[in-house]
Amino acid sequence: MKEIPDGKPITKNVDWMVVLIYIVCLGIGWVNIYAAVYNPEANSSIFDLSNNAGKQLMWIGTSAVLIICILVIDYKFYETFSFIIYAIMLFLLVVVLFAGSNINGSRSWIKFGPFSLQPAQFAILGVSLAISKYLSDPAISLNRKLKDYYPIIGIILVPAILILLSKETGLMLVFAAFAVVLYREGMPGAIPAIGMSTAALLIITLLYERWYIVGVIVVLAALTIWIMPTMTRRRGGLWATILLAGVMIGIVFGVDFFMNNVLAKHQRGRVMVLLDPDSDPRGDGWNVIQSKIAIGSGGFTGKGFLEGTQTKFDFVPEQSTDFIFCTVGEEHGFIGSFVVVVLFVLLISRLVILAERQRSRFARVYGYCVAGVIFFHFLVNIGMTIGLMPVIGIPLPFFSYGGSSLWSFTILLFVFLKIDAQRPFTLSRG
Amino acid sequence: MLENRRFVIIGFFAVIGLIYLSRLFYLQVLDESYSIVSSSNSIKRVIEIPFRGQIYDRTGKLIVYNTPVYDLLVTPSKARVEDTLRFCSVLGIERRDFDSLMTAASVYSRNKPSIFLRQLSKEDFASIQDVMVDYSGFQFAKSSLRTYTAPTLANTLGYVSEITKGQLEKQEEPYYRQSDYIGQSGVEKIYENELRGKRGTKFIMQNVAGVYKGPWKGGELDTMAVAGANLYSGIDLEVQQYADSLMVNKVGSVVAIEPSTGQILTMVSAPTYDPNILASRFFSKNYTKLVRNPYKPLFNRPVMASYRPGSTFKLIQALVGLQEGVVTPGTGFSHANCPVGCHNHAATTSIALGVTHSCNPYFYHLFRRVIYNNKISNTFKASAAGLEDWHSRVSKFGIGQQLGIDLPSERKGNLPDKKYYDKIYGENAWKFSNIYSISIGEGEILITPLKMANVAAIIANRGYFYTPHVIHGVGDQKKLDPMYTTRHESGVSMQHFSPVIEGMIGAVEAGTAKNARIQDMVVAGKTGTSQNKKGDDHSIFIGFAPADNPKIAIAVFVENAGFGGSAAAPIAGLIMEKYLRRKITNLAMEKRMKETNLMSKVVLTDQQRSLLKSDTVKLLKPDTAKKKAPVIVNPLKK
């Protein structure tokens, strides 16, 4: 291993494409936060610290300081201290349970004067580092040994339970993003496939009559068994098919139980609204309908900067945080939405490409963690504003107003960029 | 192997990105419905209703104006009334009223404001507005109330009320919305389009709570409300009120016209009511009472009531006879050979004397000559031809048709023609002897007071008239429909009027119309006694003054008052003197007329009589009529 030669600043090796996308996202996000909270009567300045746009500018400024710190700190620090950082995160999650302020019914915020921080946002960083560190051991194999999964499950489950206890279900769901990482590292493709099929089956069950679905499953199973002998000689296939059909039928019947006994009332409402937003236009459907109206009314070119009426006048809730995409959609139309979606796809794909070129497994896994986490936020956040996902309160990375989320995504991203910048000088270990 | 999974992963990201982009493309570009919802959601079209035009009398006095009032609106879904009792006591309503008003509002819409209490006066509004702050879901809306400076002209002016369901559905352009006001009768109805002005439309932005957030697009699409046009009427308010006072406790009509212009000077429909009572929040209660009143105060008698003209019709007969050439001013007829009776009077050796003495046989003979003024030997066919000829001449006086006054529901009356009698008797089955009663204005002839006043105006003008009209100027430019400036000819030559007017002067000086005399002034007039099957005769008078330079032509009808000279003639005389001199010389007659009560003579059915006994005649007065303490008391200020 070599250190960076003298006279070659770190900036030379940082991936400027990612940095550029990051800056563009922050810029667009900041302007749209201003538009979202803009009040034509008050006419406040975009730099006014009393509104969200002004505050966001301050968070952006502090993020720059954070970036400098991250780039200055030795890259080995992150790998070496992975588990310690993870432990600190866990500690903070416990602390917040007792000392946290109650904001909107969830005890997940620690208050510092007028500002508050959400440790749960930072937990992702700890979990990412811990998983990367664990998987950096070349002896770990995800496609052969089941017992190698246990530590990963543990790493994810402990913070997940703590976050759940602080009633931030949305943030807990973000841990599903690590499925991308595990898949890349050897988890059998069947597992995510089964997961997605189960979710699909769940939705189908909610939409159609139970007995029709059971009928279709039985017919499909029978067809499979009938066709199978000509395709394969494996005897186990018969039982596997019957077992699979039985599990599916079990899921179909379990959905009622799941909907009524497992999900809380507001969560059930959000799922039902996803299927039929008009079922409760003033209640659970309100957010989805208003958000779709706001985005839909933008048209091709949008209503123009500060001309949005739906987002500005509080028809859309949480305009500057979780529903910031509505402002983009309303004021800048399809063109604006297109730019944002493309920026995200570019960013995530670039991160995957960067991850793949890492020489160390730690760096690669961490890169995939960053890509997976950002992708999951993008998937759920934009999905909910256009009615394709249930309403889950997680921010749109780099766009949504909020210091905690901006800081946590900045740290997450730039730790990877720092590691990536050192790539020419790292030896491959796996 | 595992490295290849990156393509699956990047592919998955790209697919999700594509799905989202196509969904966005659908929502934002393909599906138009969202932009429509959006504008109804945050951008609201607010209609500004301008003040209705005011109405002035001929001297510039205000008759109708607007008083600003406040409507209290409630949005049921937002309404929070914790202490209903205090709320009710502030508004001066009962608990029951509160419940029923809330229910009615909720039935209309839970999320849209609907009217809770209407037309609170400025004083009431001032006293409760600070208390109402405590109750969410309630808001005030400015509105206005028609207010009348004098309790007169109710039927002529008409009233304004909430648009009915039928009217809402019938309107050709969707102008009115539910609970809008519209002129329902009289001038208010005829001039609705002028009076209502031009509505303003404002586009405003509002937030999710419906709170005003400024004009949309800086107000560039807004249109200003334009106040309704003022109307200038020919009514002389002073004379009108004097005429009202004379018609108290009588059923009937007074119509006075300025002959040179056709402007209505005075129009009384008795019994009348204070128009303010229909412009108050007690509208429906009062309206019901007016409808149930057996004397039908809502019936606009001057244009809607049809009477037999009686002897007043002899004036037209004389003019037609002279024009036809069947008589000359010097023609005389005796009482002999005549089925109609007469009273004792000097010999009628001229047409003027025939008019003066209102000699029935004179006009029987005259009409006979008019009907048989042709060469047809068959008396049936000759009668038919003669009647047609007569009909066309009389029609020119406006009889048997709508004159076209600017008031709704004007009745045609009836001027019988050939077809009419053919229907009764069969074709060629009737002749003069069947129809002679119309020679003296009885029989099948029916006429409204307005038309009779117009006949007086024609005679005063010696041959022509302008269509009578209440309003002679619309708006600041005082525009007038050309139909009211078009001179209509009666078809009778000017010289034929002199002997008739001479007879009318004689009637006032020494004949049947003596009671219409005005000291030191020459008045021309003719009485009529209109027979009716149900009760005493109706008393009728038409005339004009001064006879040499007529300034006022008048028709007075008093139901069941008997002989024409008894009630109609003196009332007409007094009104004409009031108009011409602004003071009354014959105070004894004025007193007598004011005190005459003929209501008991009006024939009513038993059912109507029972209504009369029950308490239907008492009407609720509006708050604005008298300046008293507000009905609604603010308990905080006590």
Image: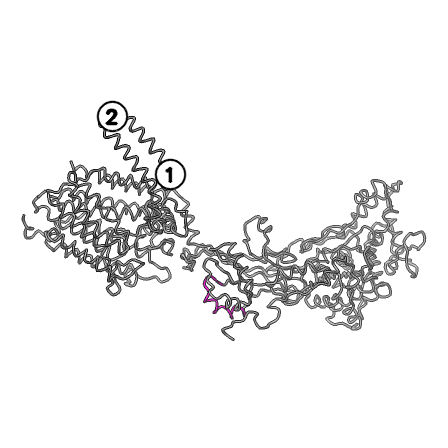
Give the percent coordinates (x, y) of residue B349.
91, 58
Residue B187, by quadrant, is bottom right
Callout in the foreground (1, 2): 1
Q: Is residue A145 left or right of residue A314?
A: left
Name the image quarter holding the N terminus of chain B: top left
Tell me the chain of label 2: A
Query: What residue is pinned by disc 2?
Result: A231
Name which residue type carries label 1: Arg
Name which residue type carries label 2: Met
Query: What residue is pinned by disc 1?
Result: A210
Give the percent coordinates (x, y) of residue B179.
55, 56
Front residue of A278/B263: it is A278
- Say which residue appears at 65% left-offset and 59% top-offset: B288
Q: Sequence-wise, which precedes: disc 1 or disc 2?
A: 1
Q: Is residue B279 left or right of residue A3?
A: right
Pointer 2: residues within 10 angstroms few (<14), some, or many (20+)? few
Instruction: Based on the picture, tell me whether residue A89 belongs to the magenta stretch.
Output: no
Give the percent coordinates (x, y) of residue B36.
43, 48
Tell me the chain of label 1: A
Is B561 placed above or below A150 here? below
Residue B429, by quadrant, is top right
- Say which residue appears at 5% left-offset and 48% top-offset: A1
Residue ranking furthest to the bottom: B638
User: From this viewpoint, is residue A331 visible?
Assistant: no
Q: Is residue B46 left or right of residue B232?
A: left
Chain part drawn in magenta: B123-139
Front residue of B295/A373: it is A373
